[in-house]
């Protein structure tokens, strides 16, 4: 259990680093602070999950940065593609779209992001993860449990609560689609911004993606694609 909590804490730390990275990147790009991510807490689990997967499968390549870069870039890209696909199927909306960038695959992943993921993964696996693990294992064991267990409980509660919010968010989106009578952008903003803070936070993190996804869904309902014979 001790080792499980160690790696869970590592997962949280890297998820937090990913959350900060997302905020900084979005802040530079959009000149505004945006709380990114689908969970209420300050973390993006996809970063923590990817880091643990890479640690599990790529540890033998740590001393070969070229192979590590290529393998890590591929793993991160596959995870990003799968996450994009699942979120689009869940919400009927594209949460990020790289269609305007060169060398993209269905707008879900692109070469520039894959390169950044690969570079980041090399530093993560070679320097950051070993440093974090060494310090976590050197932390007094008797005190560590008092920190790790509450963090685990808080994270589980966050997943449950955020999952409930996402389901309710999906129902709100479906109701907007059924009751479409005017300009969808204004209707989405009006309905969601009158909801509780978690709804507003999710919408403010991905406003364009939600609106574009809704418009696309409604357009397809009005003008369904003809089946090929």
Image (spheres, rainbow, N blue to C red):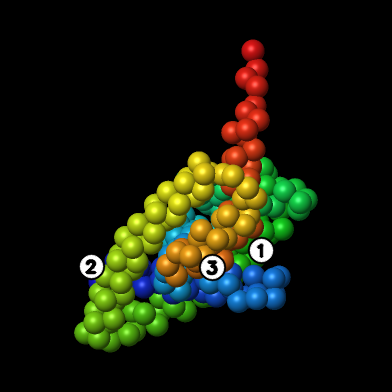
Q: Would you place residue 71 above or below residue 47 in this image?
A: above
Can you see residue 124? no
- Outermost residue on the front side: it is 181
Quadrant of the frame with the C terminus: top right
Residue closest to the eye, 141 or 99: 99
**Based on the displayed image, in which of its 4 quarters is residue 151 positioned?**
bottom left
Q: Residue at x 33, y 63 (%)?
A: 161
- Which one is nearer the viewer's eye here, 55 or 212? 212
**Residue bearing mark 2:** 1
Quick one: label 1 or label 3, which is nearer the N terminus? 3
**Which label was assigned to residue 141?**
none
Q: Which image quarter holds the N terminus?
A: bottom left
Q: Is residue 172 left or right of residue 188?
A: left
* Residue 207 appears in view: yes
Which residue sits at x=61%, y=67%? Answer: 120
Q: Which structural element holds mark 3?
A: loop
Among the 4 quarters of the image, the one containing residue 216: top right
Q: Which residue is mark 3?
A: 36
Question: Which marked residue is nearer to the observer: mark 1 or mark 3?
Answer: 3
Which one is earlier in the sequence, the residue at label 1 or at label 2? 2
In the image, residue 93 above or below residue 148? above
Give yes or no for contact between labels 3 and 2 (Cβ–Cβ under 8 Å): no
Around disc 1, counting alpha carbons within 10 Å, would you say few (fewer than 14), some (14 to 19), or many (20 or more)? few
Image height of 75 relative to 197, above or below: above
Seen at 25% across and 86% down, the residue is 143
Q: CA distance from mark 3 to mark 2?
A: 31 Å
Tell me the residue at 64%/70% (across/down).
26
Mark 3 vs mark 2, foreground winner is 3
| Residue 115 percent across, percent down from the top left | 68, 59
Tell me the residue that label 1 is attached to. Answer: 116
């Amino acid at each position: 259990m001790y080792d499980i909590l160690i790696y869970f804490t590592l997962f949280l730390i890297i998820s937090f680093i990913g959350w900060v990275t997302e905020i900084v990147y979005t802040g530079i790009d959009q000149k505004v602070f945006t709380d990114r991510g689908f969970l209420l807490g300050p973390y993006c689990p996809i970063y923590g999950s990817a880091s643990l997967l890479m640690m599990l499968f790529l540890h033998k390549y740590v001393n070969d940065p070229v192979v590590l870069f290529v393998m890590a870039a591929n793993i991160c890209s596959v995870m990003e593609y799968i996450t994009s696909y699942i979120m689009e199927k869940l919400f009927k909306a594209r949460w990020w779209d790289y269609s305007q960038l060169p060398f993209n695959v269905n707008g879900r992943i692109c070469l520039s992001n894959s390169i950044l993921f690969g570079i980041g993964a090399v530093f993560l696996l070679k320097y950051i993860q070993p440093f974090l693990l060494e310090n976590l294992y050197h932390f007094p064991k008797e005190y560590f449990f008092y920190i790790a267990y509450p963090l685990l409980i808080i994270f589980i509660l966050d997943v449950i609560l955020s999952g409930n919010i996402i389901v309710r968010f999906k129902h709100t989106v479906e109701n907007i689609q059924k009751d479409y009578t005017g300009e969808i952008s204004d209707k989405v903003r009006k309905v969601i911004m009158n909801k509780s803070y978690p709804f507003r936070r999710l919408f403010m993190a991905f406003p364009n993606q939600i609106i574009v996804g809704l418009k696309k869904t409604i357009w397809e309902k009005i003008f369904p694609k003809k089946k090929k014979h």
